Image: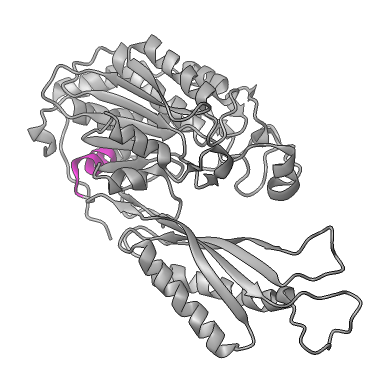
Amino acid sequence: MLPATTPVPFSAEQKQWYEQACAKIDPKRLQRLLFDLTDIHSPTGATRAASEFMVAHLDKVGFEAGYQPLTETSGNVKAQYKGLGGGAAVMLYAPIDTHLECTPEERALLTGPATEADMQPRAQQVDDWVFGLGASNPKGMIATLTEVATALIEAKVPLRGDLLMGMADGGMPVDISARQHAGMSGGVLHLLNRGMYPDFAIIMKPWNWVYHEEPGMAWFKLRVYGTLGYAGVPHDIPGFRSSVGATATVIPELERWILDYAENNTSGVIKPHGWIAGVRGGDPERPAFPSFLTELFFDVRVNPRMSPADVKAQFAAFVADLKARRPELDMDWEMYGSTPGGTTDPQNWIIQSCKRGWEHIEGRPHGTPDWLAGQTDGAALRRWGVPTARIGWPWPAQGAPLPVAEGLGGMGATYIPELLPCARKVMYALIDTLTRSRSEVGL
């Protein structure tokens, strides 16, 4: 149970500034930006066009904005709107890369036919809806935060602190080897290390809660060995062991361990789920020869009160126990990717300020949010010492007028009216924080 939100009332001036700024929020302008940005394909490691577009846009609305190259094909957005002085620096942050490439190879293996509106690397608009790959996450977040910042600037609120906007490549939980291993929060760390380190950060992500912490990730490969076989021999031939058949035994054991792991490591607001992502083995050009190796790969999430090394030790114990119970299994494994989780003190100013904004719009106490297992760059921000609040909106959108994919899909169906309450919550936190002195916000 999290503590109740600390009340810090607005002054009469702050109330007026907040109302003036919220009145400047323009849903149609937000929708136009979202459509234009969604229409620029920006898979991880190839975000240059989208980032350069956002730099130009932020320049037009009053920011000092710049493009921060990472590679020939990718880069970050860094922008600043300077206050009068003596206040805190707050960064509105969102990743800018999408989780899918939309290539024929990807459709054949990962996504399926992907004919739905949210799976296309181009934008479509129907009434108050915008569709297209990433139109909800991350581009709906970028467009909403940009609209909040634009409205705040247009309202001419006398800010004491600096308003920063950061957008980085590498926010998706991937490792794209063909693009210098883009992913795994590489872009946001580059942003922080090169002049964009704020006092506080606000990251927008799905789910209508304020979160003070997020999990990390641990990626594993579990290799199950057998012997090279041949389709023309009996199944009881001496010395032959099927790696595929043995893997079929291992999979339910591993699935049970993943469920137990999540239960055993739940704390704070994090329940660190995981899933087996794939099984790999054999050669389709040689179906007569069962392979000696079949490999499982999977991701489990890492609670911020533990390290990837702790997860590694738990998995090692599982494998040792499985081998003891099933000595016929020949296995080895490795952890091939890891990022720790991150947490901010729930009493920190920016967490409490965002919760005050949430309660102002929702008209009820915030309470304890739903369990969280989704990973974002917010974990990296917190690990590097930036107090960070995650705030969001209801997801997925319901009642779409075009077909959208089931499950996670392309995270690309956005109903603009559902973004507006979150925009007003973020605006509340900005007025609450940027119009005060550093000492007033605990700095």
Q: Nearer the viewer, residue 401 or 146?
A: 146
Q: Which residues are magenta?
A: 347-356
Q: Main secondary structure of the magenta part?
A: helix
Any part of residue 23 in sight: no
Q: Nearer the viewer, residue 329 or 144?
A: 329
Q: Position of residue 437 (x, y in %)?
A: 10, 28
65 to 443, vertically: above or below: above
Residue occupying the point 89% across, 81% down: 233
Residue 354 painted magenta: yes
Q: Nearer the viewer, residue 75 or 42?
A: 75
Q: Position of residue 443 (x, y in %)?
A: 11, 37
Q: Position of residue 177 (x, y in %)?
A: 56, 44
Could you say which quadrant of the image residue 327 lies in?
Answer: bottom right
Any part of residue 373 in sight: yes
In this view, the residue farthest toward the right is 232
Residue occupying the point 47% across, 23% down: 51
Quarter the N terminus occupies: bottom left
Residue occupying the point 42% across, 45% down: 376
In this view, the residue farthest toward the top is 60
Q: Position of residue 89 (x, y in %)?
A: 21, 29
Left or right: residue 228 versus residue 422 is right
Left or right: residue 260 versus residue 126 is left
Left or right: residue 149 versus residue 293 is left
Residue 409 painted magenta: no
